[in-house]
Image (tube, helix red, strand yellow):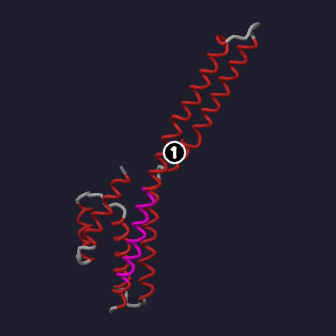
Amino acid sequence: MVLNAASRGVQSFEERFWSGMDLSQLYKEGTQMQREDVPIVGIENIFRAGFKEFMRLRQQASVDKEAIMEGAQRAMRVAFSREEEKLERHLAFLASVGSVSPYVGLFGTVIGIMNSFIGLASQTQATLQVVAPGIAEALIATAMGLFAAIPAVVAYNRYSSSVDTITGSYVTFTDEFSSILHRQVHSE
């Protein structure tokens, strides 16, 4: 859900950004959206942080052009980091489930086999009926561990790939937007 919102946010905002709309107008639209409780996510937060700092520093007469650019880029880096944290929030859980589950299954396997040997030790004659329940228990534990681990690893890889794609869009946008701001500040 978070990834879908971020991906839609990238597409929606980039369409508006590259439509030729004035940057101040685009910023004002975002402010209006916030007033109407429309969530602003991802790339638009990066834009708003950079543009706000750019405009704030530009209004100060004593600030040189490079300081304006550095301030805007720093604000975008901070916003980028926050957005990246939001996207990566659930990755640790998926990684933990994917890496720990096989060990839980292995532990269950060891317990099941131990139970089989304990049952075998108390018998005078070794038969399949004595050993089979413990082995079956062991195999079920192994299967449950794999049943949890495999989907978690697949989900982690898919989620991680999507996060990389979205954050790549954020990086590209940040670089492009920095270039636009650089041209603006040096055209004065």
Reading the image, the residue beneath label 1 is: 153
Residue 47 position, x and y percent, is 35, 71
Is residue 143 shown left or right of residue 85?
right
Q: Residue at x 33, y 66 (%)?
A: 44
Type of amino acid under label 1: Val
The answer to whether 65 is drawn above or below residue 39 in the figure is below
Q: Secondary structure at mark 1?
A: helix
Residue 165 position, x and y percent, is 42, 61
Choose between 55 and 167: the one closer to the eye.
Answer: 167
Residue 15 position, x and y percent, is 26, 68
Q: Quadrant of residue 68?
A: bottom left
Principal SS element in the magenta part?
A: helix
The residues colored magenta run 162-181
Residue 158 position, x and y percent, is 45, 51
Choose between 88 and 164: the one closer to the eye.
Answer: 164
Q: Quadrant of residue 86?
A: bottom left
The reply to whether the magenta stretch includes residue 16 is no
Is residue 155 shown left or right of residue 110?
left
Q: Residue at x 62, y 25 (%)?
A: 138
Looking at the rendered image, the quarter that the C terminus falls into is: bottom left
Choose between 176 and 63: the one closer to the eye.
Answer: 176
Is residue 45 shown left or right of residue 104?
left
The answer to whether 188 is drawn above or below residue 173 in the figure is below
Choose between 41 and 129: the one closer to the eye.
Answer: 129
In the picture as drawn, the residue positioned furthest to the top comes out as 124
Q: Residues within 10 Å of mark 1 (few under 14, many from 20)?
A: some
The answer to whether 120 is drawn above or below residue 40 in the figure is above
